[in-house]
Amino acid sequence: MPDSAKPKQLLHLVFGGELTDLGGVEFKDLDRVDIVGVYPNYASAYIAWKAKAQQTVDNAHMRYFIVHLHRLLDPQATA
């Protein structure tokens, strides 16, 4: 497949863990932060995020996040 036919890679990181406070984003224990993975697009990151979030639904302090790594790597680019 030629490079021009491949979809643009837009990296996304999915991670999470237990927060100290429901209203914040400070983790209770950084050694226990769960790095789920890095995904080539938002759609696949969302599927991974949703699966992990549903596994921890019984713990209100558990939160998972999607970080748009492509925006951090190339802040001048528009997606």
Image (cartoon, rainbow, N blue to C red):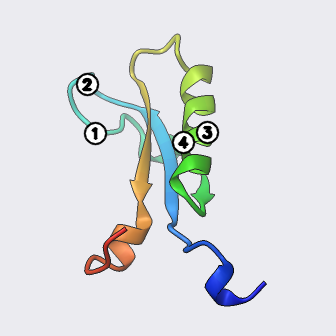
Tag 1: Cα neighbours inside 10 Å, few (<14), some, or many (≥20)? few
Q: Which residue is mark 2?
A: 21
Contact (Cβ within 8 Å) of mark 1 with mark 2: yes
Residue type pointed to by label 2: Asp
> Closer to the N terminus: mark 3 or mark 2?
2
Q: Amino acid at mark 3?
A: Ile
Query: Residue 77: x, y in percent?
Result: 32, 78
Q: Earlier in the sequence, mark 3 or mark 1?
A: 1
- Mark on residue 14? none
Gap between marks 1 and 2 measured at Cα:
7 Å
Closer to the chain start, of discs 1 and 4, is 1
Q: Which residue is mark 1?
A: 26
Q: Quadrant of residue 48?
A: top right
Separation of residues labelled 3 and 2 (CA atoms): 26 Å
Q: Residue at x 25, y 25 (%)?
A: 21
Q: Which dot, 2 or 4, sits closer to the camera?
A: 4
Distance Cα–Cα, label 2 vs label 4: 24 Å
Which one is nearer the viewer's eye here, 47 or 6? 6
**Residue occupying image coordinates x 67% and y 80%:** 5
Q: Which mark is residue 46?
A: 4
Residue carrying label 3: 47
User: Viewed as shown, does residue 54 lie left or right of 65?
Assistant: right
Q: Secondary structure at mark 3?
A: helix
Marks 3/1: CA–CA distance: 24 Å
Sooner in the amino-acid sequence: mark 2 or mark 4: 2
In the rendered image of this protein, does residue 76 appear above or below residue 62?
below
